[in-house]
Amino acid sequence: MKYRVFWTPDAERELDEILEASADFIVVGTAAKELDRQLISNPYDVGESRDRGTRVGFVRPLAVQYEVMDDVATVIVFGVWRTDRQR
């Protein structure tokens, strides 16, 4: 099954801020695209489960917090951050 990926406005804003502050924006942009690709195809293989049905996924240098809604084949990304110290 393929999933739709929806980034909340806050998550989109966080990603924009990360991209704007990054000297390596191509690497960050590529990681964001790869996260989308993986979440579309199999969101349960991307990360680890957390409390209340949320998950955390990693494609370095990014991490995302998300929830999978199987009944509507949708992944909602709630937050994104860098996994390294560069800001």
Image (tube, rainbow, N blue to C red):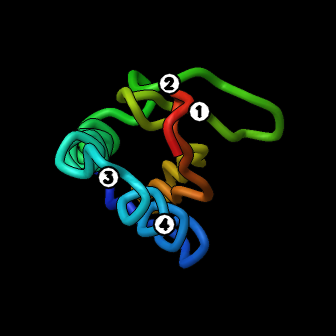
Q: Amino acid at mark 2?
A: Gly
Residue 29 locus on image (x, y percent): 24, 51
Nearer-the-camera pick, 36 or 10: 10
Q: Which residue is mark 2?
A: 47
Q: Which residue is mark 1?
A: 56
> Which sits earlier in the primary sequence, circle 2 or circle 4?
4
x 34%, y 42%: residue = 39
Residue 18 locus on image (x, y percent): 45, 57
Residue 2 seen:
no
- Picture quadrant where residue 85 is located: top right
Q: Which residue is mark 4?
A: 17
Q: Which residue is mark 3?
A: 3
> Hey, which residue is sitting farthest bottom in the picture?
9
Looking at the rendered structure, the secondary structure element under dot 2 is strand
x 61%, y 58%: residue = 78
> Which sits earlier in the primary sequence, circle 3 or circle 2?
3
Q: Amino acid at mark 4?
A: Glu
Disc 3 + disc 1, Cβ < 8 Å: no
Q: Is residue 9 left or right of residue 75?
A: right
> Which sits earlier in the primary sequence, circle 2 or circle 1?
2
Disc 2 + disc 4, Cβ < 8 Å: no
The residues bearing labels 3 and 2 have C-alpha atoms spaced at a distance of 15 Å
Residue 72 locus on image (x, y percent): 45, 62
Looking at the rendered structure, the secondary structure element under dot 3 is loop
> Which sits earlier in the primary sequence, circle 4 or circle 1?
4
> Which sits earlier in the primary sequence, circle 4 or circle 3?
3
x 52%, y 59%: residue = 76
Q: Amino acid at mark 3?
A: Tyr
Q: Residues within 10 Å of mark 4 (few under 14, many from 20)?
A: few
Looking at the rendered structure, the secondary structure element under dot 1 is strand
The residues bearing labels 2 and 1 have C-alpha atoms spaced at a distance of 5 Å
Nearer-the-camera pick, 79 or 43: 79
